[in-house]
C-alpha cells in the first residue's frame, strides 16, 4: 500500500495525487506521480454500485482511499458537467447527483482535498500532458467513443471544460445515440458502417471548430486500425489515444495538481 506521505516538488507541493476514475460500471484508482503521469501502484477497481447514489458512490471512493491508506490530495473524474466541484448533470449515475457538491462529499470521505472533473476532460488532460496531444499547439479535441461520446477541447494546451459535444445532433438524435461505440455493438454494425457514422460526426465537429488534431479515446482506441483508415473525408489529423485505461486516473490526479499549483511535466 502507498500512504499519503508523498514526494514533493521544488516548491514543496505534493506531486503524488490519488487519481479516481468513476465510471458507469467500475470505479478505479491509483496514486499518480503528476510529474511523469506514471501510476505508483497497480490500479484497484471496485464495481460501481447500483443504484449509483451519492451515498453509495462516496462509500466506494472512501473504500478506494482506504485501500491505498490515503488521506492526501486527490482527483476524481465524474460523468457529468462539473463546475467548481458541483455536478450539474448525471450520466450513468443516479440523478440524485445533480446539484451535489461532489468535491465536498469526496473530500469529507477521504479526509483530504479533492478536485472533481468531467470524465472526458480528465482523459483529455492526461493525453495532452503525457500522451497523443503532448507538445501540440492550436485546437486539439479529444473524442471518447464508449457508452456515449465524450469530448475535451483544448486551445494551446488549455482546457475549455464541459463541452459535451456528444450531444450535437445527427439528424434527430444526439450524436452519441448514432456513433458511440456502444451503438456499434448494439446494432451489430460492421466497422465500415460504424466508421461512416463516426466520420459524419467528426466532419460536423471539424466544421464548427477547425481543429488541428483529433484524439480518439475510449476503449475503442485499442482497435484504431479497424476504423481510422475509413475516416478518409476528415481533413484534420486523427490519432488514437495512448494512455488507454489509465487516462481517467492520470487526468483526475493532474486536474488536482493544476488546481493546487503542483508542478508537473512540461
Image (cartoon, rainbow, N blue to C red):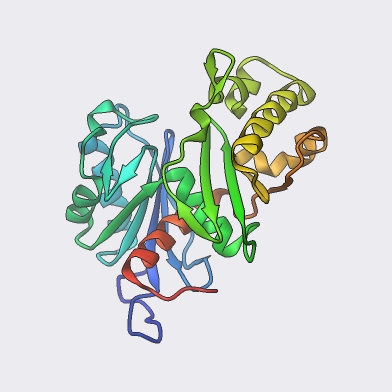
As displayed, is residue 82 above or below residue 90?
below
As displayed, is residue 19 above or below residue 95?
below
Residue 168's spot in the image, x, y percent?
Answer: 52, 27
Residue at 42%, 76% (x, y): give it.
263
Residue 247's spot in the image, x, y percent?
Answer: 53, 53
Please tell me in which quadrant of the rendered image residue 170 appears. Answer: top right
As displayed, is residue 190 above or below residue 208?
above
User: Of all residues shown, which one is farthest toward the bottom?
Assistant: 10
User: In the rendered view, does 21 fall on the left or right side of 241?
Assistant: left
Residue 254's spot in the image, x, y percent?
Answer: 43, 62
Residue at 56%, 33% (x, y): give it.
146
User: In the rendered view, does 70 fall on the left or right side of 34?
Assistant: left
Judge whether residue 223 can be spotted in this image. Answer: yes
User: In the rendered view, does 90 fall on the left or right side of 38?
Assistant: left
Judge whether residue 217 can be spotted in this image. Answer: no
Residue at 74%, 28% (x, y): give it.
195
User: Of all residues shown, which one is farthest toward the left?
Assistant: 108
Please tell me in which quadrant of the rendered image residue 249 appears. Answer: bottom left
- In this rendering, the count of numbered labels is 0
Front position in the image: 82 or 206:
206
Residue 135's spot in the image, x, y percent?
Answer: 63, 66
Q: If the image is split into quadrants, where does the N terminus sit?
A: bottom left
Q: If the image is split into quadrants, where does the C terminus sit?
A: bottom right
Amino acid at each position: 500500500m502507498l500512504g499519503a506521505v508523498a514526494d514533493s516538488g521544488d516548491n514543496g507541493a505534493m506531486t503524488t495525487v490519488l487519481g479516481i476514475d468513476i465510471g458507469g460500471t467500475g470505479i478505479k484508482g491509483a496514486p499518480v506521480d503528476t510529474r511523469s503521469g506514471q501510476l505508483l501502484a497497480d490500479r484497484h477497481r471496485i464495481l460501481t454500485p447500483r443504484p449509483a447514489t451519492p451515498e453509495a458512490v462516496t462509500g466506494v471512493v472512501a473504500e478506494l482511499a482506504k485501500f491505498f491508506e490515503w488521506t492526501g490530495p486527490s482527483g476524481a473524474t465524474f460523468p457529468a458537467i462539473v463546475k467548481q466541484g458541483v455536478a450539474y448533470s448525471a450520466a450513468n449515475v443516479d440523478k440524485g447527483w445533480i446539484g451535489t457538491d461532489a468535491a465536498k462529499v469526496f473530500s469529507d470521505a477521504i479526509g483530504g482535498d479533492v478536485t472533481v472533473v468531467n470524465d472526458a476532460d480528465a482523459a483529455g488532460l492526461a493525453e495532452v500532458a503525457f500522451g497523443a496531444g503532448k507538445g501540440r499547439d492550436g485546437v486539439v479535441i479529444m473524442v471518447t467513443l464508449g457508452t456515449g461520446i465524450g469530448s475535451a477541447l483544448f486551445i494551446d494546451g488549455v482546457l475549455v471544460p464541459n463541452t459535451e459535444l456528444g450531444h450535437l445532433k445527427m439528424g434527430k438524435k444526439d450524436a452519441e445515440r448514432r456513433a458511440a461505440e456502444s451503438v456499434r455493438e448494439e446494432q451489430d454494425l460492421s466497422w465500415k458502417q460504424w466508421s461512416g457514422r463516426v466520420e459524419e460526426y467528426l466532419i460536423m465537429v471539424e466544421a464548427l471548430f477547425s481543429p488541428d488534431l483529433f484524439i480518439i479515446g475510449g476503449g475503442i482506441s485499442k482497435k484504431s486500425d479497424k476504423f481510422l483508415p475509413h475516416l478518409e473525408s476528415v481533413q484534420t489529423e486523427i490519432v488514437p489515444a495512448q494512455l488507454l485505461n489509465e487516462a481517467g486516473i492520470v487526468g483526475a490526479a493532474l486536474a488536482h495538481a493544476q488546481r493546487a499549483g503542483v508542478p508537473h511535466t512540461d
